[in-house]
Image (tube, helix red, strand yellow):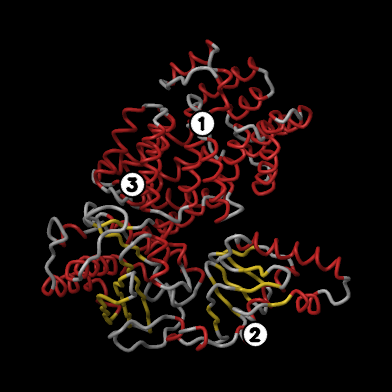
Amino acid sequence: MSDRDKPDAASASLVRFGVFEVNLRSGEIRKRGIKVRLQHQPFRILEMLLERRGEVVLREELRQRLWPSETWVDFDHGLNKAVNKLRDTLGDSPDNPRFVETLAKRGYRFIAPIEVVPDAPELAEAVPPVPHAEAAVQAPRFDSGRLGLRGYLPALIAFVILAAAGAAIWTRRPPGPAVPNRTMLAILPFANIERDPEQEYFCDGMTEEMILQLSRLSPARLGVIARTSAMQYKNTSKRVDQIAKELGVEYLLEGTVRRSGPRVLISARLIAGANQTPLWVESYERDAADILDIQSDVARRIADSLAIELLPQPAEARIAGQRAATDVYDMYLRGRYYWNRRTPVDLERAVALLETANAKDPTYVPAAAALADALNVLPWYGLRPPRDAYPRAKDVARRALVLDESSAAAHTALAYAYHYFDWSWPDAEREYARALALNPNYAQAHQWRAAHYAELGRIDDALAEMQQARQLDPRSLIIQAAIGWINYLGRRFNPSIDQLGRTLELDPDFVPARLWLGQALAAAGRPADAIEHNLRVRHLAGPAPTGLGELARSYAAAGRTREARETLRNLLDVARMRYVEADLVARVYEALGDEERALEWLERGFDERAVKMVLIGVDPQFDRLRGNPRFQNLLQRLRLPNRGSR
């Protein structure tokens, strides 16, 4: 439905654009379904801009509506401040705007496409129709007790895999945009027709599973965009050709699942990104009772009509997946959903769910690999000491590999534990290589292997590996930021600062990018700028240990010793109550010039196997210690390179 065919924004209560949803009636704004805070005046500005999308809203009009009693001088300051707060919330930029355009000395204009949702939307309006699909019926609210979408996810995955493979064969393929002789495909998030928040995790998990399955279809000839990037187009109003250009893909796969009583309709279509032409369309309506039969039925129908040249082996062998009981599969999807959110609370939820799933079905490999991933990242967030998390992660990953040696996710999780806990570089390299041999489309393996190379001083190899991760996951903030971080480790400070700055243009509140930018600025001789970024980290992350440590370091680098020591005392107070990595304290003492205490804390970090000890061989923060025999001894014990004193 085009903008002009939809109800006017001024008469509706819900408006969507990009990853945002604005409820004009309640005054709430949500980003990817999560409520974000926006003050009253910035929200009213947004409301007025949405009501007149595409038109210039003059500054005087805003004054008359929002600040009728203010003088022009007071209003001018207040308006600029409110617009800046609005842009911060939207992650927008005045120089390269995606949403709010500034017309100098005149006013503002909302430039992004919007979707206006009427107060009582029909099913046909909520879901774009698929050509040639059977007639849809009004879908009632999802009842997990009666059907449960999880029951037919394996059939849907098989259906989509064969559809994509067959369509790619008989359509004329343009040259691949990034990797020669390889077609690039993106799977857009399947629509949650019910719009039930409790089912959002399922739709996300369904997309993740399809990406995993399709990425293993024929990796040498078919590249698949990773989940992190694909999920940014959930509920998007962008055109297919625009998405294809942003992701660097030739094809996009989209689909819908609709249910009415005992009937379910599954529809999917493959679209050429350049001209938005549907290349293949199919839909099936069946009784819920025989939904699991769709897998073999669809495979037979498509195999009869299409040459399966893309597949190196029979389709049934390639797409066969491990099934789990409904409750186990439910817990696996919820665990992955929370793990991807990466907040401390959500990581704890993920571990609890995945531990339960593994206890109920120890043979279900995807849940075991997911649990190993969740345990692996806990020490990075200060949620577990390394000795509590990593042995368990290794045990779970190894058990998964006994059950299924072909699991790239389990090989990657095991590599990560070898990397950050055992400091066994050959074992880590072997497992990363095995994961990527099994699934070259696994962006997470490319990303973690790049960090492995960087920490061994192989900066060029790390950047090359990270570029592969970025191609597969071009919208991933952590991958974008990690490219800047690797440049920092390689003493390429200006490229690092530029890359991290571009990442923050995408999301000004992305903590890793802001933290690493503070490190790069300090290393480049700009301590005052580093303090500004680390204060922002402290604000965003609260009393998180890393934020306190980096703030103390930047104070010390700027010669503000009193503030540095006060912040260090706060960090040590936190360490009395919860786990704090010893090397983080060592970094502050090094910046204060207290070499002996810095080395004492580094040795403590070695004993506790602190996660970021692997960085000391290359991190510029330790350059002044490199000539110290105690430091050189630590590097030898870690089997890390010494870049020499500086």
Q: Are marks 3 and 2 in contact (CB under 8 Å)?
A: no
Give the label, 1 or 3, closer to the camera: 1
Residue 10's disc is 2
In this view, the residue in front, 57 or 225, is 57
Q: Position of residue 205 (x, y in %)?
A: 40, 61
| Numbered mark located on residue 172 in the image | none
- The residue that label 1 is drawn on is 491
Q: Which one is in front, 298 or 116?
A: 116
Q: Which residue is pictured at 56% across the width and 88% down the height?
A: 7
Residues tagged 2 and 1 counted as in contact (Cβ below 8 A): no
Q: Could you classify mark 2 by the number of other residues whose Cα lies within 10 Å: few (under 14), some (14-19), or many (20 or more)?
A: some
| Image depth: mark 2 or mark 1 in front | 1
Tell me if mark 3 has few (under 14), some (14-19) or many (20+) residues whose alpha carbon lies within 10 angstroms of its own. Answer: many
**Looking at the image, is mark 1 or mark 3 earlier in the sequence?**
3
Decide which of tag 2 and tag 1 comes sooner along the chain. 2
Q: Amino acid at mark 3?
A: Ala
Horizontal arrangement in the rendering, residue 202 relative to residue 623 (left or right): left
340 or 483, which is in the foreground? 483
The residue lying at 38 percent from left, 65 percent from top is 244
| Of the image marks 3 and 2, the number of the one nearer the N terminus | 2
Rendered image quadrant of residue 456: top left
Q: Are marks 1 and 3 in contact (CB under 8 Å)?
A: no
Check disc 1: other Cα within 10 Å, few if <14, some if 14-19, many if 20+: some
Q: Which mark, residue 409?
A: 3
Assign a secondary structure to mark 3: helix
